[in-house]
Amino acid sequence: MAQIINGKAVSLAERERITKETEELFSKYGRRPGLAVIIVGEDPASKVYVANKEKGCQEVGFYSELYRLPEDTQMPELLSLIEKLNNDDKINGILCQLPLPKHLNEEEVILAINPNKDVDAFHPVNTGKIMIGNHSFLPCTPAGVMKLIESTGTDISGKECVVIGRSNIVGKPQAMLLLQANGTVTICHSRTKNLKEVTRRADILVVAIGKADFITGDMVKEGAVVIDVGMNRRADGKLTGDVDFESCEKVASYITPVPGGVGPMTITMLLENTLTAFKNTL
Ligand code: GUN
């Protein structure tokens, strides 16, 4: 039976460290890291994420601003808000919650954020830096996954790492971080042939495809570390990941639960990036 990776506990330890450092910096410089979060429209999942980001800031002693913009906001208004925040010294990190309503251009919004305040690490300057192994900010979810793997004591170097999913937010940067840790990395996606053959090779399996309970125990190598980035709602209303926990925990050595695995780490990594952005201004 696999050991369960406790994302809440790992996250709490990281947040305690961030809180302590924030207080030390405040007593030395009289300023706190500041995060601005922008949400456009009424997407229910986005509203929950944004509320949790605000709460996270309060917990660790950051200054924060929340901008709730109406669904019919147009690009010029959104871009002028970002410009104002780019020039505001109280704000070290700017995050515009995605997805945006369809009439808005996400790429243009990401490009408008000053790369030094891009705590999502979505701007091409930051994604490019991740690619060449010289990052300013690590993308939040993949960075959280790396912390969770680290918490198991697993040495990634030389291991077969399989990432399922190729999104810009998770799959692609995740592969880069595993590669940087000297893993042998394979990225799988919807067109991958013989998926099971590939996943069964994985010493470390990271799943981010958005399909409930998709990875079953027969697709997992004995003793693998299984990280589930998925967050899906079942017909009965229960939250579940992309990994069928019940069958996989019998085969894996370590496994993340949903909820309580990767989820709590993502916001913690956002706080970490905001602290880094603040320190870069001192
Ligand atoms: N939507 C889903 N995940 C994220 C994230 O990490 N950052 C932003 N800005 N939007 C998201």
Image (cartoon, grey):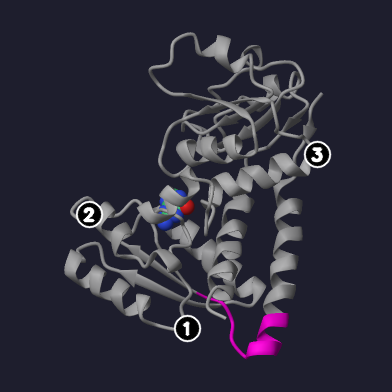
Q: According to the image, label 3 marks what residue?
A: 153
Residue under numbered circle 1: 90
Disc 3 on helix, strand or loop?
loop
Question: Gap between marks 3 and 2, in whole Å?
Answer: 42 Å
Please determine whether, in this image, residue 172 is positioned above or below residue 55. Answer: above
Horizontal and vertical percent position of residue 70: 26, 67
Q: Name the residue under label 2.
A: 105
Q: Which residue is drawn at 70% across and 64% down?
A: 15
Q: How crowded is mark 3: few (under 14 residues within 10 Å), some or many (20 or more)?
A: few
Which of the two discs, 3 and 2, sits closer to the camera?
Answer: 3
Q: Earlier in the sequence, mark 3 or mark 1?
A: 1
In terms of depth relative to the viewer, which is nearer, 1 or 191?
191
Q: Is mark 2 on a helix, strand or loop?
A: loop
Q: Distance between the residues labelled 3 and 1?
A: 38 Å
| Quarter assignment of residue 273 | bottom right
Seen at 21% across and 66% down, the residue is: 73
Query: Can you give x and y, in whole percent of width and height, for residue 204 in the image?
Result: 66, 28
In the image, residue 77 sits, relative to residue 87, either above or below, namely above
Residue in front for this viewpoint, 144 or 242: 144
Q: Which amino acid does label 2 sit on?
A: Asn
Residue drawn at 53 percent across, 64 percent down: 53
